[in-house]
Amino acid sequence: MPVESSIQHTLASSVSRNGIGLHSAKMVDITIHPAPENTGIVFRRVDITNVDTAIPAHCSNIADTMLNSRIMNNEGVTVGTVEHLMAAFFGLGIDNAIVDVNASELPAMDGSSAPYCQMINEAGIIAQGAPRRFLRVLKAVTVETDHGKAEISPSDELIIDIAIDFNDSAIGASKYFYIHRNNSFEEEISSARTFCLYQDVTKLRAAGYALGGSLENAIVVDDGTVLNEGGLRYSDEFVRHKTLDCLGDLYLGGIFVLGHITASQPSHALNNKLVKTLLADESAYEIIESKPEPVILNDTVREPVAALA
Ligand SMILES: [Zn+2]
């Protein structure tokens, strides 16, 4: 299975969709293509032709973390709201893919990662020959912003432990404990949608955000009530979506991370600060080519001892 595999994976074929950008309200076509080993995830703007439009999905290319994660290359070419697709890539164990879009923002789809998972599964997932690289955390790294705090500490698998507390009784205080294993992303968090408070909608739109937002692609909460027909997909959908965002932002580190994240009131700014601070401290991690296996005493383990004698 791709998530727990120690070799790289990509899509088996190309797959396309279209939709509206959450913040820009622009219609956008998206095609996800397979990519060779060691490509990583690379976005391209096919509506721009006079410059290099390839933007590797890496936190060194982050241009904005206000209400979305926007990346930019050296030519100033940008693409925004990449986090829900990045979460789907991480969640399904995709190492390599090229993503073509013809506008400045990815489609909002239904506000979750589920439609992206559906695209990837429809295309199929194939194993490649090269070993997968993992970043394994060796010591704790802690960051803070005005509103939130996050830490990543050593663990042999990825764990995301999130707490939120919102001043609206429909959201309130909740926690989620996520262990990243085969199928866990699709089963637990991929369908959790983004959300906002109705009282913030006018402010957001005045600032140029959420222009494409609607009850079709976001949960809207007003004074203790969920305005979407049909209500929530999970009673704790809000904190599950924050877990999804964390996973997507974490993958802007460009590598699958093995570590235990504990975060309160996370935002894209906090998630990106955590990834950048971790990557900047080379003593805080090691790069390995296979996930650690439990230590089992058998003949294979004893052989080198015999050789020494
Ligand atoms: Zn989100």
Image (spheres, rainbow, N blue to C red):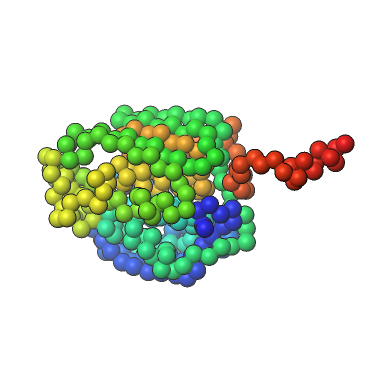
Q: Residue visible at 62% across and 58% down?
A: 130
Vertically, is 67 above or below 53?
Answer: above
Q: Is residue 167 visible?
A: yes
> Which of these two is toward me, 39 or 226?
226
Could you tell whether 71 is left or right of 34 in the image?
left
Residue 26 image position (x, y, % from top left): 26, 61
Vertically, is 16 above or below 261?
Answer: below
Q: Residue visible at 41% across and 33% down?
A: 262
Residue 107 image position (x, y, % from top left): 31, 59
> Which of these two is toward me, 253 or 246?
246
Residue 154 image position (x, y, % from top left): 53, 34
Could you tell whether 36 is left or right of 195 in the image?
right
> Which of these two is toward me, 126 or 67?
126
Residue 17 image position (x, y, % from top left): 34, 67
Vertically, is 108 above or below 302?
Answer: below
- The image quarter containing residue 48 is bottom left
Q: Residue visible at 40% across and 51% down?
A: 185
- The image quarter containing residue 207 is top left
